[in-house]
């Protein structure tokens, strides 16, 4: 039970009550988020308010890389909370150590860090840096990408739902095609399609840009966009394009950093060093924190204090971050992610052959997606089934992320890096049961 029995008192029959209370006063969430009402969690196990236990394939939302409530992180938070919670921009003993550790993991030319609170905030800060350093204002991003829900980051996101109803977008936002390998035309292989998409990207920029491109922002894989991973040729072309435009590259690793992909930072797996690196989510195991990792020659284009944030780099977040980094190192979680990746993808290969409607299963490390379709020939998206799989998985005692992708038909998986082999196998068995029981008789 991973210690859950000792940390919770089940309250039978309360799930509907809590859902009704939220519906009465809180803004509604997207479908698929309310499969269970969380009460407590430890490691890779969750307990709901009814006392039922679940295996977690979400890490919250790619936050709990070290598992939920890791004792080392909890202890660090408790001790710091009793000492100092906030001092705004005044120095404190932990902040410089956080920066030193992050720069050590990033390596390369990185030598400066700005500490923020949320993923959207660090993306916004990176864009500010890029605009100031280049004295230009246009930002190129990719279709089906997700960079946040603020006005500025929504303008960069290539997910139609994120941009809808919040326009006009920020001037200078240029969205170009991303090479979705699963939905490419049949006459192209993956590399050919990536090259063609980059050809189209260059043409879109030529048509729309007024010669003021400051930066290209990109995720190492499409996260909310459906777990798509571009081939190596894409990254070669991206660097060539950035150099041609004399533009910076901003790597959005809000979802992918801190060991999740089998490298400490995902960009290290692409052999591609960005100019600015944005990280959040797994940085502090659930305590809100984010960072922009870059270079002094870029940061110094902004006046001192412009990137200051009320909660950025606060002592509590820094303590949680340092404890998280210690756990990742001491427990070998980067290598653990590599091992678990082979376990998951081994099962995916069988499902694509054996289970109707599993059109594709893909990802980078422990950020994965299963694309559900009406049939393998038409590839018509089956968004309704994706929602049913999320609900069925919960009935089987497994929590997965709500449907993602611009077509809402991709079931996302992002388990904690501390997931045991036993829980991995059991969770995959439960997910397979959910996939099989939701198969439709139509179109197969």
Image (cartoon, helix red, strand yellow):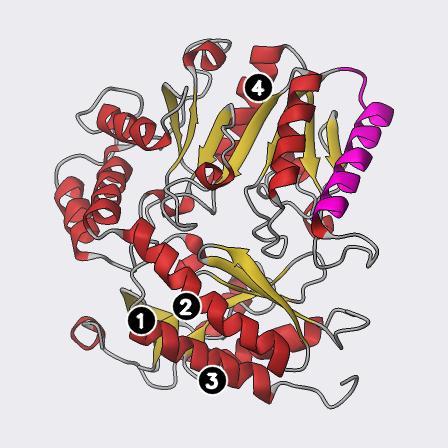
Q: Would you name the residue on which mark 4 appears? A: 130
Q: Which quadrant of the figure has residue 95?
A: top left
The residue shown at (51%, 81%) is 432
Judge depth for marks 4 and 2 and give the one in front.
2
Vertical placement of residue 229 versus 301, above or below: below
Instruction: Tell me whether the residue at label 4 lies in contact with that at label 1, contact meaning CB atoms closer than 8 angstroms.
Output: no
Q: Using the image as rendered, state which of residue 78 and residue 160 is in the foreground.
A: 160
Label 4 secondary element: helix
Instruction: Pick whichever of labels 1 and 3 is earlier in the sequence.
Output: 3
Q: Distance between the residues labelled 4 and 1?
A: 43 Å
Q: SS of the residue at dot 3? A: helix
> Residue 67: x and y, percent?
30, 59
Side (left or right) of 424 relative to 136: left
Q: Circle 2 — which element? A: helix
Of labels 3 and 2, earlier in sequence is: 2
Residue 61's image quarter?
bottom left
Q: Is residue 202 magenta?
A: yes
Q: What element carries label 1?
A: helix
Q: Give the range drawn in magenta.
A: 191-211
Q: Quick check: marks 3 and 2 in contact, CB under 8 Å?
A: no
> Measuring 54% from the left and 42% from the top, which residue is drawn there?
220
Seen in the picture, residue 112 relative to 35 is either above or below; the reply is above
Q: What numbered label is drawn on residue 343?
A: 2
Spot the residue most to the right: 207
Q: Which of marks 4 and 3 is nearer the N terminus?
A: 4
What residue would you read off at disc 1?
A: 421
Whether residue 5 appears in this view of the structure is yes
Q: Mark 3 points at which residue?
A: 395
- Cα–Cα gap, marks 2 and 1: 8 Å
């Amino acid at each position: 039970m991973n210690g859950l029995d000792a940390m919770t008192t089940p309250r039978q029959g309360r799930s509907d009550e809590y859902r009704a209370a939220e519906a009465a006063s809180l803004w509604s969430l997207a479908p698929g988020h309310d499969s269970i009402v969380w009460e407590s969690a430890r490691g890779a196990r969750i307990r709901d308010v009814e006392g039922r236990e679940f295996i977690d394939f979400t890490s919250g939302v790619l936050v709990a890389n070290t598992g939920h409530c890791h004792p080392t992180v909890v202890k660090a938070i408790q001790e710091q909370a009793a000492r100092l919670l906030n001092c705004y921009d005044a120095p404190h003993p932990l902040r410089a150590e956080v920066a030193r550790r992050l720069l050590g993991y990033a390596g390369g030319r990185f030598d400066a860090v700005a500490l923020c609170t949320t993923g959207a905030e660090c993306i916004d800060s990176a864009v500010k840096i890029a605009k100031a350093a280049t004295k230009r204002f246009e930002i190129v991003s990719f279709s089906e990408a997700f960079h946040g829900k603020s006005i500025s980051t929504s303008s960069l996101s290539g997910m139609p739902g994120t941009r809808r109803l919040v326009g006009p977008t920020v001037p200078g936002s240029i969205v170009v095609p991303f090479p979705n390998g699963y939905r490419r035309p049949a006459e192209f292989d993956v590399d050919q399609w990536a090259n063609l998409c980059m050809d189209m990207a260059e043409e879109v920029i030529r048509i729309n840009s007024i010669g003021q491109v400051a930066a290209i922002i990109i995720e190492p894989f499409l996260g909310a966009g459906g777990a798509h991973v571009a081939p190596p040729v894409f990254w070669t072309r991206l660097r060539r394009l950035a150099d041609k435009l004399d533009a910076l590259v901003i790597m959005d690793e809000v979802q992918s950093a801190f060991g999740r992909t089998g490298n400490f930072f995902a960009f290290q797996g692409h052999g591609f060093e960005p100019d600015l690196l944005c990280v959040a989510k797994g940085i502090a195991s659930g305590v809100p924190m984010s960072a922009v990792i870059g270079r002094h020659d870029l940061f110094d284009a902004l006046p001192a204090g412009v990137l200051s944030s009320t909660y950025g780099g606060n002592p509590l977040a820094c303590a949680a971050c340092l404890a998280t980094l210690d756990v990742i190192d001491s427990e070998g979680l980067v290598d653990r992610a590599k091992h678990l990746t082979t376990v998951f993808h081994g099962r995916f290969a069988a499902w694509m052959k054996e289970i109707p409607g599993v059109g594709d299963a893909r990802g980078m490390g422990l950020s994965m997606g299963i694309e559900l379709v009406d049939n393998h020939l038409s590839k018509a998206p089956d968004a309704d089934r994706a929602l049913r799989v999320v609900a069925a998985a919960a009935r089987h005692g497994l929590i997965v992320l709500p449907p993602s992708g611009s077509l809402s038909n991709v079931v996302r998986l992002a388990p904690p890096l501390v997931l045991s082999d036993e829980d991995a196998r059991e969770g995959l068995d439960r997910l397979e049961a959910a996939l099989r029981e939701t198969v439709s008789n139509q179109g197969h």
